[in-house]
Image (cartoon, rainbow, N blue to C red):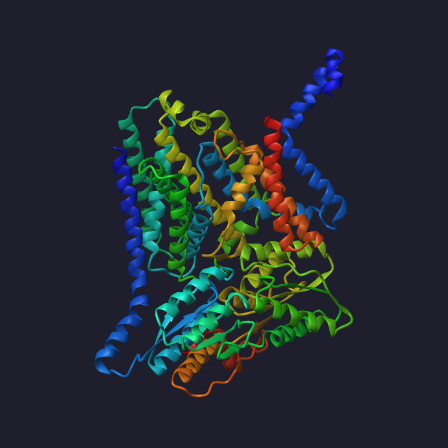
Amino acid sequence: MRAVQDNGPPAPFVQFVRAARLVIDKAGPAAGLIILYVYFGATTKGFLSAGNHVNMGLQIAVVALLAIGETFVIVAGGIDLSVGSVLALSGVTTALLLASPHPMRPAIVVVGGIGVGALCGLTTALLPRRTHPVPVVVAIVGSSVGALLGLATAWLLTRRDPVPVPVAIGAGIGVGTLCGLVNGLLVTQADLPPFIATLGMMGICRGLAKIQTQAQNIDLSGATSFMRLGSGRIPHGWGVPIPVAVLLAVALIAFLVLRFTSFGRYCYAMGSNKEAARLSGVNVKLHTTAVYAVCGLLAGLAGVVQTTRISVGQPTGGAGYELDGIAAAVIGGASLMGGIGTIAGTMLGALIMAVLRSGCDLKGLSLEWQEVVIGAAIILAVLADRIRQR
Amino acid sequence: MRRVLLLLCVGALVGALGCQKGTEAPTTASPAVTGAKAGTAAPPETKYTIAVVPKGTAYSFWGTVRAGAEAAGRETGVKIDWKGPAEETDVARQIDIIENFITARVDAIVMAACDAKGLVPKVKQAMDAKIPVVTIDSGIATDDALSFVATDNVKGARQGTEKLIELIGGTGEVGAIPFIHGAATSDMREQGFNEAVEANPNVHAVKPLYSQGDVEKAMKAAENMMTSNPDLKGIFAANEPGAIGAAQAIKQRSLTGKIKLVAFDAADAEINALKEGTIQALVVQDPFKMGYQGVKLAVDAIEGRPVEKRVDTGVVLVTMDNFNDPEVQKLLYPEVSE
């Protein structure tokens, strides 16, 4: 191509080449996905069936939710290793509230309530652009207390067995958010490296999940209205499976937030150069804390989604999923150095992993080889990225 | 000012931890309390400490092993020290645990090996240190351990698969969901499955997919197995996560009863799936007996009595036909029978 350029080709051709390069630059992961899809579609029986497409969507929903949260953290220059364990803690929290009476119930609801409240508070704090610090704190504390009272009242009023499904889900997501918030505070207030803070949280959450359940799976066969969320579809009966619908909604919101809000822009700014972001007036600590809270929230949501899908609260669930989530973000073009990454890319990364896993399974490729193939895919994706950036 | 928020969160976490402790206290404290009482009232009680090391702690199977071990402990006046790795794949962690027990000089070790070869050196080390080792459920590759108390997994899987073949009418495709390629128990159950299939010329086995001991991964495996083999008539799930995952996948596709499912073990979720008809038969081992016999044999060994090298604890095929038999109920709900 370069030789052609040197010979002075007509302008439209140069433009075409430039456009083509741009497409290749932007669409690396997409091209990878298409190649894999066509390959498995052509060579594997059953891969192109409608049922398998629904399956792939369901199979990637949990990891993709984690990957979206991870994208926020990675773009902002951090990393979160705790999401797999937070997923398990949130999942068993919801499961315990829905299963038999549990002595921990008030504590779980209160912790969940604080999480939900903290989330509301952070959202309130992040909404106005140049708010005075005092109103921010007032907003955080106020909405924390509000949500706490809300959840606690809901629990006290109902006191039914089992707890109403929305309270159980709220508590699960709240516990996840609270874990994320603590991660964020450890990183911003205690100044711990994200790797260390979240590594610690990974152990704490895994341990708490096992302590709560005495390390047993919590059977939810009886909680039919909750289980319907995992097997149901929107619109009812024939549409998109609910876990996939949740994923699509979250992906859309995350895309809009990261792309079009000041919070989203700050994430890129902080990830590119924290000091520069601080000097240009970004409240780095507040926004970094918020980023981890969002990641925790999504891990909590992923835990609830996984629980609806597999019908048990699994204290060992999600082990290693944090790495799958990080891998999806990285395959999708996010840089672990911070400042680079998109939700669309992450979704592509997650899809590539889903297609690889499903395709290898359907082909009957052994698990050992799947590990090799996915490992190679991660390296190839980042290598391609490096070459493009040169 | 943000310090207030920090304090609030730390407070909440500490509070949560406090509550956790509160609920956990009775379970951990009670053996110690009874031990202390026994120590003052009747000195010969709690004469030994026996370490019981499971492969994992997450499945009700291990909870029942623990109940059996503790029952034997109460009977013989032995303190049971229960500790195992969280994941059944975590060989390194199990090695650490065994090392620590050797250092702590427990009187005997009762263990289920995460890896048949990987744990051989540790068993040797313990035996050399005059600490008798009894393996339960999952043995080691050599015969260094004093005794092996377990289900004959090949035989159990063969019986279960024969039931599955009977359920599908003696002809068609069946698939296995073992847990970890290379783990002794998983491999033996896969072998039993294959033996039963090979004995029936009209039955064909599709490629096995592994659950890796995780319910969600098992569910994916079952989904993918059904997708790539549209004529699949039956699934054999080799343990609890495989069974729950496969049952969920079958339910999700509204194929309950159309694809037959026979599974090892009897967790709550599996029993419920049996009742609602997603699972047709359960291959139930006797984990209570494993824990119980394991500890009893260990005491025999400490006190110098001869110990049998191999004890088969057997399996029972549970279907809705024999579900309400008292013998079966005792096996399914061991805590109740206590």
| Front residue of this view, candidates B242 and B74 | B74
Q: Position of residue A319 (x, y in %)?
A: 49, 52
A13 sits to left or right of A258? right
Q: Is residue A358 visible?
A: yes
Front one among A105 and B108: B108
Where in the figure is residue B77, as x and y percent of width and height? Answer: 33, 81
User: Where is B308 relative to A26, above or below?
Assistant: below
Q: Is residue B38 above or below residue A268?
A: below
Q: Position of residue A146 (x, y in %)?
A: 31, 39
The residue drawn where x is 50% and y is 85% is B308
Which quarter of the picture shows residue B253?
A: bottom right
The spot of residue A358 in percent (x, y) is 65, 49
Specify whether B338 is left or right of B227. left
**Which residue is painted at 50% across and 81% down in the image?**
B326
Q: Where does the N terminus of chain A fall, quadrant-wise?
A: top right
Residue occupying the point 56% across, 45% down: A61
- Outermost residue, front side: B128
